[in-house]
Amino acid sequence: MMREAHMDNQTLEAEQTLVGHLTDLRKAIISSVIFFLVCFVIILVSIDYVIPVLTDASKLVMLGPLDVVRFYTGIAGSLSLGLSAPFIGYQGWKFVRPAMSAQESKTALSFIPGIFFSFLAGISFGFFIIFPTVYGFLMRIGSENFDMMITAKEYFSFMLMTSIPLGFLFEVPLFLMFLTAIGVITPAKLVEMRKYGYILMALVSALITPPDLLSQIIVLGPLIGLYELGVLFSKIVYKRKGLTEEEQVDHQ
C-alpha cells in the first residue's frame, strides 16, 4: 500500500515537472515571438530608409504589386530575425538553465553577446565585401551578351545567399570555444579534424561564389582563418579550464 502511494507521488511529481517545463517553454516562445513582431513592425515602418541601404542605388524592377509586399516583408522578416537572435538565445538559455550545471549555465550566458556580434560581423563581411564582389562579377559577365534586368526578389535572394551563411560561419570560433568550455571537444580533436573542416569550408565557398578562382579564394581564406581562430580559442579555453580544475583539486 505504501509502495503504491510512493509510486503515485513520483508520478505526480513527474507530471508537475513536465507541466512546469511546458509552461516555461510556452513563455519563452511567446516572449520571442512578441520581440520578433515588435522588431518586424519597426523595420516595416522604416522600410523607406532601409531599402536604399540594401539596394545601393541598383536598378531593380518589380513584376507585380504583390512583389512589393513580398519584398518588404521578406526584408523586415530577415532583419527582425537577426535582431531578435540575442533575445531568442537568452530565452533558450533560461529554458535549459535548470538542466545545466552552474558553470555550464554561466558559460553559456557569457557567449550570447559574442555570438550576436560574430553573426553581425559575418553578415557585414558578406554584405559589404562578398555580395558586391560576386554580384558585380556576374553582372559584368551577363552584360556582355544580354541586357540585364534584375528583379527585387532575385536581388534580395542573392544577397541573403551570400550574407546569411557567413553570419553563421563567423560564429564557428565562439562555438568551438563553447564546446571546449563544456568539455565536448578538445583542441587535439579539432587539429585532428582540420582537413575535414577545410573540405567543408571549400564546399561552402564553392556554393556561395561564382566558379572563378579569385572569388572562391576571397571567401575561402577568411573561412579557413575562422577555423584556425576557433582552434586557437579552443586551446586558450582548454588551458584555462585545466588550470581551474587543478586549482579546485588543490583547494579540496
Image: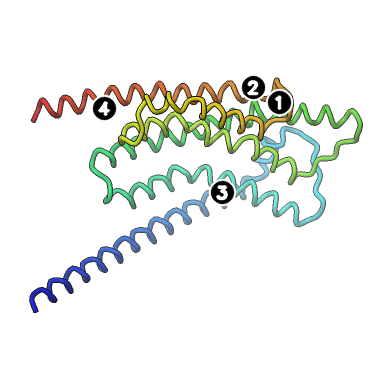
Q: Nearer the N terminus, badge 4 or badge 3?
A: 3
Q: Nearer the viewer, residue 159 or 75?
A: 159
**Which one is in front, 58 or 97?**
97
| For the residues bearing labels 2 and 3, Cβ distance under 8 angstroms | no
User: How far apart in space, not on screen, are marks 1 and 4 (Cα)?
Assistant: 42 Å
Name of the residue lying farthest toward the bottom: 1
How many angstroms separate mark 3 from mark 1 (CA)?
A: 30 Å
Residue in the foreground of this view, choosing between 175 and 147: 175
Q: Amino acid at mark 1?
A: Thr
Identify the residue position indicated by label 3 in the image.
42
**Residue beneath disc 2:** 218
Q: Earlier in the sequence, mark 3 or mark 1?
A: 3
The 10 Å Cα crowd at callout 3, few under 14, some 14 to 19, many 20 or more, is few
The percent position of residue 91, horizontal first and vertical second, equals 38, 50
Between label 4 and label 3, give the one nearer the viewer. Answer: 4
Q: Residue at x 59, y 46 (%)?
A: 78
Q: CA distance from mark 2 to mark 3?
A: 35 Å
